[in-house]
Amino acid sequence: MTSGFPEAAVRDRYPLVVGDREVTAATLMPATAPGTGEIVAEVPLSDAEVVDQAVAAATDAQQAWAGLSAAERGRYLRDLADAVRAQAEQLARIDALDSGNPLAAMRNDVVYGADALDYFAGIARELHGKTLPASANGLHLTLREPYGVVARILPFNHPLMFTLFHAAAPLAAGNTVIVKAPDQTPISPLEVAYLAAEILPPGVLTVLTGDGAITGEALVAHPGIGRIGFTGRGTTGLRVMEAAAASGHVKHVTVELGGKNPLLVAPDADPAYVAEQAVGGMNFESSQGQSCGSTSRLYVPVGMRDDVVDAVAARLDRIKVGDPLDPATTMGPLVSEPQLSRVRGYVETGTSEGARLVRGEGPPDGVPDGGYYLAPTLFDRVAPGHVIATEEIFGPVLSVLEWQDRDDLIAQANATRYGLTANIITNDLDWAMDTARQVQAGCVWINGRGQHFLETPFGGYKDSGLGAEGSMESLLSYTRTKVVHILDIGARP
């Protein structure tokens, strides 16, 4: 990769670590840098045979891993967190190179991922059962036990952070974990696997790379896996659930899917503050809008629209699009050429539907040749029925809509198949709380940008998914409840 900035040191070819040995698949896949379109490495395409090997290694390791105390498992996870922090800059550079996200954002991802390991290492000690007064003379208690081998299937937008974050809870609960790395961003998950191989017992954490239709489906259908967590596009999540049901085995499946998230502006809001929250909430400067939590529908009161649109446009003008490894870059490229083409199609659709394109016409200036760059895009005069107001774009496209009364606002906000997040901007606490209760979303921020906190669950309503990530709730979801009834403790002759 040609760049005027310090590069990320990537290997030409990445092996897999399965159990205590390296495995090279028969077929390799290219890993492409979105900033230039260049192939920077090759990774294995894990077929059904490799999946079998990974499940066997994870199964062999699981009983001993679960047999450790929560404190002992926690020490392993904290050691892995320390190893990640020791290589934080290099891992962030690899993530920026492979995902296209700006380097500053990827540095934050490394911190959050390591913190997730520490967090779940700590709360694992709180994973306990209950005693229940079910009868007068008996003792009735519950035990929390791990599922065994867990599969985690990840999206492309935060590869390193999601590898750590989504593995932490099931590992802390005593499961062994197989991570299916994203097709488009496989490198940093493999780097995590190499660190884990030096710290965790063999087979406890395995990272597989490969095509979702081959590797992912083999994992979902495997009889040795009873618990699956998927994060990604809604259509793929439905296929995961269908494949799990068709496997002939009952599996516990949770899915965190897409969002078409509203940002609801009250009449008392300041347009400049709204602009900062709208740009921050859209994740322009962390993942190019490629986030399920992006607030892509901005609802402003009638009479405030022009001021808000002008303020948002001015804020977008300050975004520096460019090489993700350039420290001055605040927005990088989209993850792949197909993703760029898809988002461009939505921009063309928005224009043809009659919405006003305020920012985003033409490619950004001064970006490297061959990269998958798109300018931050703003549409005004968007109607509720427009495609860009109803479908998840998963790119840097923000739509501004107007509302007349609060009933109208709530109706518009809820008129979507999704229900992941919502943001509210107001100085009126009653208005904020009443709106928060009525909006159909699993997570609501008031005067915030969608910041995530490890202590709180994250999940959606409707077609935005089932289950929650983060917090004790996630840890519990990676355990099964066993009930033990002791009815007669006395010895019998």
Image (cartoon, helix red, strand yellow):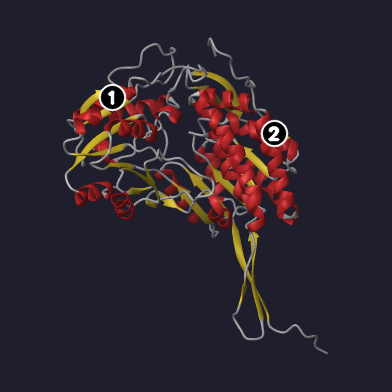
Residue 447 is at least partly visible in this image: yes
Give whichever of 233, 56 is nearer the camera.
233
| Image vertical order of residue 331 relative to residue 183, above or below | above
Residue 440 x, y percent position in the rendering: 33, 52
Q: Amino acid at mark 2?
A: Ala
Viewport quadrant of the C terminus = bottom right
Image check: 390 left or right of 40?
left
Q: Name the mark on residue 83.
A: 2
Image check: 242 left or right of 93?
left
| Image vertical order of residue 146 relative to residue 46, above or below | below
Circle 2 residues within 10 Å: few <14, some 14–19, many ≥20 = some
Q: Where on the picture, by quarter, is residue 403? A: top left
Residue placed under numbered mark 1 in the picture: 313
Q: Amino acid at mark 1?
A: Ala
Name the residue rendered at 52%, 23% in the picture. Answer: 103
Q: CA distance from mark 2 to mark 1?
A: 42 Å
Q: Secondary structure at mark 1?
A: helix
Q: Earlier in the sequence, mark 2 or mark 1?
A: 2
Name the residue rendered at 59%, 22% in the picture. Answer: 41
In the displayed image of the protein, which residue is found farthest to the bottom? 493
Q: Where on the picture, by quarter, is residue 192? A: top right
Circle 1 residues within 10 Å: few <14, some 14–19, many ≥20 = many
Give whichever of 417, 239 is nearer the camera.
417
Residue 92 x, y percent position in the rendering: 58, 26
Residue 492 x, y percent position in the rendering: 80, 88
Q: Secondary structure at mark 2?
A: helix
